[in-house]
Image: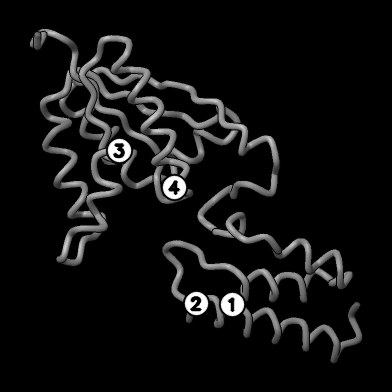
Amino acid sequence: MIIMNKELVYVAIPYTWNKELSFEIANKVSAILMESGYNVFSPISHSHNIDYYITVKTDFNFWMEQDLCILHKCDKLIIVRINDKYGDELIKNSPGCQKELNLAKELDIPIEILDYHCKIFEDVRNYNVGKSDYSKYKIQPWDIWLEYKLNPWDADVVKRILRTKEGDSRKLDYEKIIHICKERIRQIDEKIN
């Protein structure tokens, strides 16, 4: 029997920081909410796998159009905060969560924060703070810094070579490296440590 008067909730979660883990958490949270009696729309649960089968180029705006039209029909927005220590920053840096929050506020849809404890955050090597992607690699910049006992200038260059940062072009990284190297050369020429 279908119960039509159950509350419809929209589950938002920061996604691009770690797509596979966000997908897993979104599914777990959605399952718990469904078992608790909610009707659930989880855009990440819904769209993550569909993306593999879409033959046209998709982008952030494509998915937001798909998702936000459903948020209009929801009774509540639930934002999953992954570990309270870094969760607020993940939400703040998530363009999707920010759009969802803004629309919910605009439509006077109640907003609830649901804290989800994730063991990945117990090991500092398993996550990033900000938009860099170091944590997905076994060898991280600080491993090289420590092994080679690099000074801060050389360490900064290594960091910029190894990272890809959402929103920054690769050209910008190389321009920053050149700028850092010029400053270091100036210091060497002037016999500054």
As drawn, the residue found furthest toward the front would be 1
Secondary structure, mark 4, is helix
Q: Taking 101 as reference, is 120 left or right?
A: right
Residue under numbered circle 4? 20
Q: Amino acid at mark 4?
A: Glu
Mark 3 and mark 4 lie on one chain; the one further toward the N terminus is 4
Q: CA distance from mark 3 to mark 4?
A: 11 Å
Q: Mark 1 and mark 2 in contact? Answer it, CB < 8 Å.
A: yes
Q: Quadrant of the C terminus?
A: bottom right
The quarter of the picture where residue 15 lies is: top left
**Where does residue 126 sit, x and y in percent of width and height?**
63, 47
In terms of depth relative to the viewer, which is nearer, 107 or 162?
162
Q: CA distance from mark 3 to mark 2?
A: 34 Å
Q: Mark 2 and mark 4 in contact? Answer it, CB < 8 Å.
A: no
Give the residue drawn at x 58%, y 68%: 163
**Which is in the foreground here, disc 2 or disc 4?**
4
Mark 1 and mark 4 lie on one chain; the one further toward the N terminus is 4
**Which is in the foreground here, disc 1 or disc 3?**
3
Mark 3 nearby-residue class (10 Å; few <14, some 14–19, many ≥20): some
Residue under numbered circle 1? 176
Q: CA distance from mark 1 to mark 4?
A: 31 Å
Q: Taking 129 as reference, is 82 left or right?
A: left
Q: Taking 43 as reference, is 124 left or right?
A: right
Q: Which mark is residue 172?
A: 2
Residue under numbered circle 3? 45
Residue 99 drawn above or below residue 155: above
Mark 1 and mark 3 lie on one chain; the one further toward the N terminus is 3
